[in-house]
Image: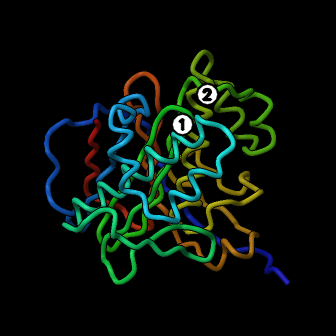
Amino acid sequence: MASSGRSLVLHCADAVVLRPSEAPPPEAPAPGTVHVWFSTLEALGTRRDELEQLLDPVEQERAQRFRFDHDRERFVLGHGWLRELLGRYLERDAGLIRLARGPYGKPYLERKTLRFNFSDTKDAIAIAFATELEVGVDVETIARAVDHQAVSGHYFTDAETEAIAAAGEHAKRRFLEFWTRKEAVLKASGVGIMEDLRALRVDRLRNAVLIAHEVFQQMAAPEYHVRTYHIGEGHIVSLASPEAVAEVRVWGV
């Protein structure tokens, strides 16, 4: 039987506009630092054949099972790019890196201090890396077709819904800020999916919430620190971790 609930604190920084760096990245993230990589599918598409060759047999088979071409392309480009970046950080052949999965599907590296998380949307990909720190990342495109007014009532608290409405012409942007924050927290915990997203309040700098979801109660850290970034004019990325990080560095391709 599920318990009555467990307290959790979500610290959510105000969203900031960020321009990804094109400078060569350093080595693996230092403790307290998170690296975020961002790219559009269009940019990665110029290297499609190269990235596809990095997929392992399981990923290649999975790619062939997609019904729609655009879903297959997003999978191939995203997972090939993930392997390429892991190969850089680990200084290993990207195609030979073995990924394990947690009980709810979150991929990870066995016996490695490098942690990572992957997110994609219809036209972009974001991947976060940290050392000995679980991270969750979520990316959304402003161009996404969504009725934010209708959806807000199902997944957001009354206070969040009011904050979205108060944003006026930027209401959709505010909606996606809140949505990516919730998703990033779930992904950082390793749960990935939770029906009652209203339980994760993310509109204030400090949000004390009570979680009834039994699995999330077991897997979540006592608190999460969430940062939100506007990447150019078209995308929003949120990053969550169970500890405050000193620096987030973002690269784009």
Figure quadrant of residue 140 = top right
- Residue, x 35% and y 70% (percent of image)? 97
**Of residues 55 and 24, the one drawn nearer to the viewer in this rendering:** 55
* Residue located beneath label 2 in the image: 144
Label tally: 2
The three-letter amino acid code for the residue at tag 2 is Arg
Percent from the top left, x then y, of residue 208? 61, 61
Question: Quadrant location of the N terminus?
Answer: bottom right
- Residue, x 68% and y 60% (percent of image)? 193
Figure quadrant of residue 10 = bottom right
Percent from the top left, x then y, of residue 200? 65, 55
Colouring mode (rainbow / by chain / secondary structure / one colour): rainbow
> Residue 140 shows which numbered tag?
1
**Of residues 237 and 95, the one drawn nearer to the viewer in this rendering:** 95
Residues tagged 2 and 1 counted as in contact (Cβ below 8 A) = yes
- Residue, x 76% and y 28% (percent of image)? 149
Q: Is residue 16 above or below residue 223?
A: above
Q: Is residue 196 above or below residue 151?
A: below
Q: Is residue 239 above or below residue 3?
A: above
Q: Residues within 10 Å of mark 1 (few under 14, many from 20)?
A: many
- As drawn, the residue found furthest toward the top would be 169
Percent from the top left, x then y, of residue 55? 42, 58
Element assignment for label 2? loop
C-alpha span from label 2 to label 1: 7 Å
The three-letter amino acid code for the residue at tag 1 is Glu
Percent from the top left, x then y, of residue 253? 28, 36
